C-alpha cells in the first residue's frame, strides 16, 4: 500500500539535509587540504596540479604498498594498458590459451615467475577482450618474453588496437635509479598496479638526460613521526608533512596527464604522483591519515631511505601555498633516471 504524501515528507527532507551536510563537509576538507601539494604562483616554483588529502582519521583502507616484494608488490594488482599490443617471443600461444578477463591473463603471466630466484619466464602479456572487435580471437591470452623488459617491444597502440597489454617484473627486475648528488634512490616500479605511470617512467629511461627533473621541496619528520615512519600519538599531522617533492617533466618532452591508477595508503617510501603528474613526491613516513587519493607507481628500497631522509633535512626557505606553510629547498636537487642492473644479493628487496 502506498504511503500518503504527508508521511513521505520527513524522510525526503531528512535525506536531503544529510546529503547537503555531507557535500559541505567534503568541500571544506578538499579546499583546505588540497593545497598541501600545491605550489604558489611564484615563477620560481613549478606549478602543480591540485590533489586532495583526506582528514586526519585513518580510513581503514588498503594497508599499503609492499616495498619491492617479489613479483608485483602491489597487493594483488594485475592491470594492463588498453589499445596497445606488445610483441615478444611467445611462451604461451593465445589461440589455445583463453580467459574471460585481462586480469586473469595477467595473473597467468605472473604465475610463471620463478619467485625468489631469477627472472620471470613470462614478463609480458597480451589479451583480446573486446568481443565485437576481437571476434574469434576474443579471450586469447598471449604470454610473452621480452628481450628487454625495461624497453618492451610495442607493436602498435591507439583506439583501433583491440588488444590490452601489460608487463610483469620479477624479483630484482623493474628497478630504476633516481640519481642525485646525495646518492641513488633505487625505485621498485609497479607496472601491474599503475601501468600508465610505469610506461611514462620507462619512456624517461630512453632519454640521455632527464633535463628539468629535480626535487624542489623538502620537509622532514619534525616531532610528529618516529624514525620508522610511525605517527607519534597526539602529535600534529603537519606541517612539516614529511616528504620530498619534485617534478619528472623532462624539458622538450610533452607530458600527458596520467589518470588515477593504484591508490593505496601512503607508506614510508611510497613514490606517488601529485594529482595527474608530472609533479611527484616520496613519503618519508606512513601517512595513514591521508585518504587513498594518490597514484603510487613505485617504492624506494628500504636501504635507500636514508638518502631521502638526508634530502628532507636540506636547507629550506619558508613559503605559503594557499594558506599552507611549506618548506621549499634553497637549492633544487637535480635528478636523473637511469637503468639499474642488480645482482639479487646486492639489495634488500623485501619489506622493511
Image (tube, helix red, strand yellow):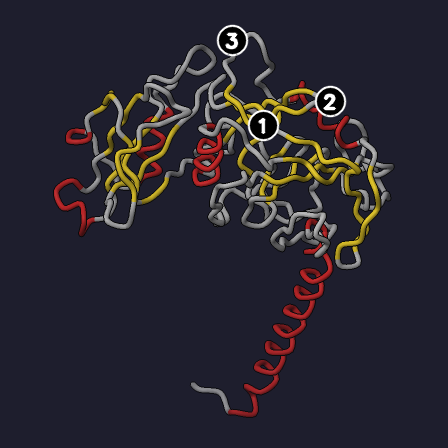
Q: Earlier in the sequence, mark 1 or mark 3?
A: 1
- Alpha-carbon span between mark 1 and mark 3: 21 Å
Residue at far left of view: 136
According to the picture, the residue beneath numbered tag 1 turns out to be 336
The quarter in which the C terminus is drawn is top right
Q: Earlier in the sequence, mark 2 or mark 1?
A: 2
Residue at far front of view: 252
Label 3 secondary element: loop
Residue positioned 22% across, 39% down in the render: 139
Foreground mark, 2 or 1, reads: 1
The answer to whether residue 142 is above or below residue 20 is above
Q: Contact, CB < 8 Å: mark 3 with mark 2? A: no
Q: Quadrant of residue 34?
A: bottom right
Q: Which mark is residue 343?
A: 3
Task: Tell whether 90 sits left or right of 291.
Answer: left
- Alpha-carbon span between mark 2 and mark 1: 18 Å
According to the picture, the residue beneath numbered tag 2 turns out to be 306
Q: Quadrant of residue 215?
A: top right
In depth, the one of 211 and 309 nearer the eye is 211
Label 1 secondary element: strand
Q: Position of residue 205 (x, y in %)?
A: 48, 28
Mark 1, residues whose alpha carbon is within 10 Å: few (<14), some, or many (≥20)?
Answer: many
In depth, the one of 66 and 294 nearer the eye is 294
Task: Tell whether 164 sits left or right of 267.
Answer: left
Label 2 secondary element: helix
Q: Position of residue 328 (x, y in %)?
A: 77, 42
Q: Position of residue 199 (x, y in %)?
A: 43, 36
- Alpha-carbon span between mark 3 and mark 2: 21 Å
Residue positioned 71% across, 39% down in the render: 216
Mark 3, residues whose alpha carbon is within 10 Å: few (<14), some, or many (≥20)?
Answer: few
Amino acid at each position: 500500500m502506498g504511503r500518503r504524501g504527508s508521511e513521505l515528507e520527513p524522510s525526503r527532507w531528512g535525506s536531503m539535509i544529510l546529503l547537503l551536510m555531507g557535500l559541505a563537509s567534503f568541500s571544506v576538507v578538499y579546499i583546505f587540504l588540497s593545497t598541501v601539494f600545491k605550489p604558489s604562483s611564484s615563477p620560481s616554483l613549478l606549478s602543480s596540479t591540485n590533489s586532495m588529502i583526506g582528514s586526519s582519521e585513518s580510513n581503514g583502507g588498503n594497508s599499503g604498498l609492499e616495498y619491492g616484494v617479489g613479483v608485483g608488490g602491489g597487493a594483488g594488482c594485475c592491470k594492463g594498458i588498453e589499445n596497445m599490443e606488445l610483441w615478444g617471443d611467445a611462451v604461451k600461444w593465445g589461440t589455445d590459451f583463453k580467459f574471460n578477463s585481462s586480469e586473469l591473463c595477467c595473473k597467468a603471466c605472473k604465475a610463471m615467475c620463478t619467485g625468489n630466484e631469477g627472472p620471470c619466464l613470462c614478463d609480458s602479456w597480451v589479451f583480446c577482450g573486446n568481443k565485437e572487435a576481437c571476434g574469434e580471437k576474443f579471450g586469447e591470452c598471449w604470454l610473452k618474453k621480452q628481450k628487454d623488459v625495461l624497453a618492451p617491444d610495442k607493436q602498435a597502440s591507439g583506439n583501433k588496437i583491440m588488444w590490452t597489454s601489460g608487463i610483469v617484473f620479477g624479483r630484482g627486475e623493474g628497478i630504476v635509479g633516481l640519481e642525485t648528488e646525495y646518492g641513488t634512490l633505487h625505485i621498485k616500479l609497479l607496472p601491474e598496479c599503475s601501468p600508465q605511470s610505469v610506461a611514462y617512467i620507462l619512456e624517461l629511461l630512453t632519454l640521455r638526460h632527464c633535463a628539468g627533473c629535480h626535487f624542489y621541496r623538502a620537509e622532514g619528520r619534525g616531532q610528529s613521526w618516529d624514525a620508522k615512519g610511525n605517527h607519534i600519538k597526539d602529535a600534529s599531522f603537519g606541517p612539516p608533512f614529511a616528504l620530498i617533492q619534485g617534478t619528472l617533466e623532462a624539458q622538450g618532452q610533452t607530458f600527458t596527464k596520467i589518470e588515477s591508477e593504484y591508490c593505496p595508503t601512503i607508506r614510508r617510501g611510497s613514490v606517488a604522483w601529485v594529482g595527474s603528474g608530472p609533479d611527484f613526491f616520496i613519503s618519508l613516513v606512513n601517512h595513514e591519515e591521508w585518504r587513498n587519493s594518490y597514484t603510487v607507481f613505485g617504492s624506494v628500497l628500504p636501504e635507500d631511505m636514508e638518502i631521502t631522509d638526508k634530502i628532507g633535512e636540506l636547507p629550506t626557505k619558508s613559503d605559503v601555498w594557499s594558506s599552507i606553510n611549506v618548506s621549499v629547498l634553497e637549492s633544487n636537487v637535480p635528478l636523473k633516471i637511469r637503468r639499474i642492473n642488480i645482482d639479487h644479493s646486492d639489495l634488500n628487496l623485501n619489506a622493511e
